[in-house]
Image (cartoon, rainbow, N blue to C red):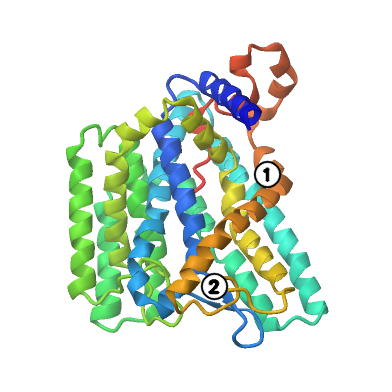
């Protein structure tokens, strides 16, 4: 144990000393916390049960409505888009200063974003065909595919906003916010068509994205604007939930008539404003915390595999669930209906198992993400001839504006 701690300490020191002095470590910390929020949120609110003879998808939020506040902790997509807008706007400005054409800049960013997706799609195409040929229920296969593929909608939206960065970087967040409000008034107040709500998929996430772009221009140098975002967003969210008829859960609940997330509602966007305000207020404490080498090393290493973690965490959970079917009876917290506090306690015990399975996925597929990083060219071959402070994982942390915001 002492040897492991010693080796980790050495690695942390190498990463810390190899990180550029001007790198905004708080940005990486916010991205890492947002990733953890999504992963833990999915693992806690997604339940694959065998109640109907096959694997069906439900949620403890559908059976235990009093758990709705849990969704406030783990619905962190607004922070993803805040960081994404900040990094993309800063990266595009840097590229222009260096004379890099727009097509080259956006091509590099999108290729790094979608390269790891190909591995997920290929594996699940083969797995789905194998399950169907092996006699699996089509409904079960459909449920599994939905869980794997549904988070990918985010990547499409993020890719569109990234490509549109030169157009939207100076757009004020009040304009997409007004679109979200108008869509909701039409949809819920005047009985408009349901399809109109999908306009908010772009408009809703454009709000935190433009806030991130404004952050890159120094608009949140002081604490007052961030505090106003936090207070105003929280007050608006509370009012919309208490008196506007919006659900309290900030994630989708199977069977619920209204989802705050699919598509985003005004309540979800208001909640996102509060999250962005809180994130901006935490920049200082996070920056100070990231000066500790061990804390920074964890965040840095997680950011290097952000896309891999995001893309494979659902697969890891489903792999554990499928292997659990080999047991002679349904396993509590894994296959049982999430209708009691005992299910929650049992599910918490499964989280380390999910994490171990995700570690296996990471080891197998992380190369698809890291292969898209331009820093991995000839650097590793010369690392052994450099001082210890510039070797190892820190080699991929040279240009903060080039790091993909894996939101």
Crowdedness near tag 1: few (<14), some (14–19) or many (≥20) residues, C-alpha within 10 Å? some
Asked if residue 152 shows in the view, the reply is no
| Position of 337 relative to 78 (above/below) | below
Residue 272: image location, x then y, percent: 32, 56
**Residue depicted at x 67% and y 79%:** 329
Q: Is residue 335 toward the left or the right of residue 270 in the image?
A: right
Q: Give the foreground label among 2 and 1.
A: 2
**Residue depicted at x 72% and y 78%:** 328
Residue 111: image location, x then y, percent: 62, 44
Q: Nearer the viewer, residue 242 or 111?
A: 242
Question: Who comes first in sequence, dot 2 or dot 1?
Answer: 2
**Residue depicted at x 31% and y 74%:** 247
| Position of 31 relative to 315 (above/below) | above
| Position of 302 relative to 55 (above/below) | above
Q: Nearer the viewer, residue 371 or 303?
A: 303
Q: Is residue 2 toward the left or the right of residue 60 in the image?
A: right
Residue 8: image location, x then y, percent: 60, 29
Circle number at residue 47:
2
Circle number at residue 165:
none
Count all numbered tags in the image, as a single digit. 2
């Amino acid at each position: 144990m002492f040897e492991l701690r010693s080796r980790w300490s050495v690695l942390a020191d190498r990463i810390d000393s190899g990180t550029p002095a001007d790198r905004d470590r708080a940005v990486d910390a916010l991205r890492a916390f947002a990733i953890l929020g999504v992963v833990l949120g999915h693992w806690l609110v997604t339940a694959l049960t065998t109640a109907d003879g096959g694997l069906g998808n439900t949620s403890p939020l559908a059976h235990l409505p009093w758990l709705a506040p849990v969704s406030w902790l783990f619905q962190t997509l607004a922070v993803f888009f805040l960081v994404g807008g900040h990094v993309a706007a800063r990266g595009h400005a840097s590229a222009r200063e260096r004379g890099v054409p727009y097509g080259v800049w956006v091509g590099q960013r999108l290729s790094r974003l979608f390269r790891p997706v190909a591995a997920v799609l290929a594996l699940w195409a083969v797995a789905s065909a194998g399950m169907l040929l092996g006699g699996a229920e089509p409904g079960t296969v459909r449920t599994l595919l939905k869980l794997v593929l549904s988070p990918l909608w985010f990547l499409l939206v993020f890719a569109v906003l990234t490509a549109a960065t030169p157009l939207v970087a100076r757009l004020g967040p009040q304009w997409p916010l007004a679109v979200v409000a108008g869509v909701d008034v039409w949809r819920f107040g005047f009985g408009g068509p349901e399809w109109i709500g999908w306009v908010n998929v772009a408009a809703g996430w454009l709000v935190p994205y433009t806030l991130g772009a404004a952050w890159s221009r120094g608009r949140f140098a002081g604490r007052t604007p961030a505090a106003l975002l936090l207070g105003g967003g929280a007050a608006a969210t509370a009012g919309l939930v208490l008196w506007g008829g919006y659900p309290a859960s900030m994630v989708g609940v199977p069977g619920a008539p209204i989802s705050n997330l699919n598509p985003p509602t005004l309540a979800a966007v208001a909640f996102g404003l509060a999250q962005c305000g809180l994130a901006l207020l935490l920049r200082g404490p996070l920056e100070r915390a990231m000066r500790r080498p061990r804390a920074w090393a964890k965040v840095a290493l997680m950011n290097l595999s952000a896309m891999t973690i995001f893309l494979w965490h659902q697969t890891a959970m489903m792999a554990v669930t499928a292997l659990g079917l080999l047991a002679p009876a349904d396993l509590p917290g894994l296959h049982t209906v999430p209708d009691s506090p005992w299910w929650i306690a049992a599910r918490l015990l499964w989280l380390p198992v999910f994490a171990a399975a995700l570690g296996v996925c990471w080891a197998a597929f992380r190369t698809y993400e890291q292969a898209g990083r331009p820093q991995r060219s000839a650097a590793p071959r010369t690392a052994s001839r450099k001082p210890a402070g510039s070797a190892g994982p820190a080699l991929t942390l040279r240009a903060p504006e080039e790091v993909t915001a894996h939101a």
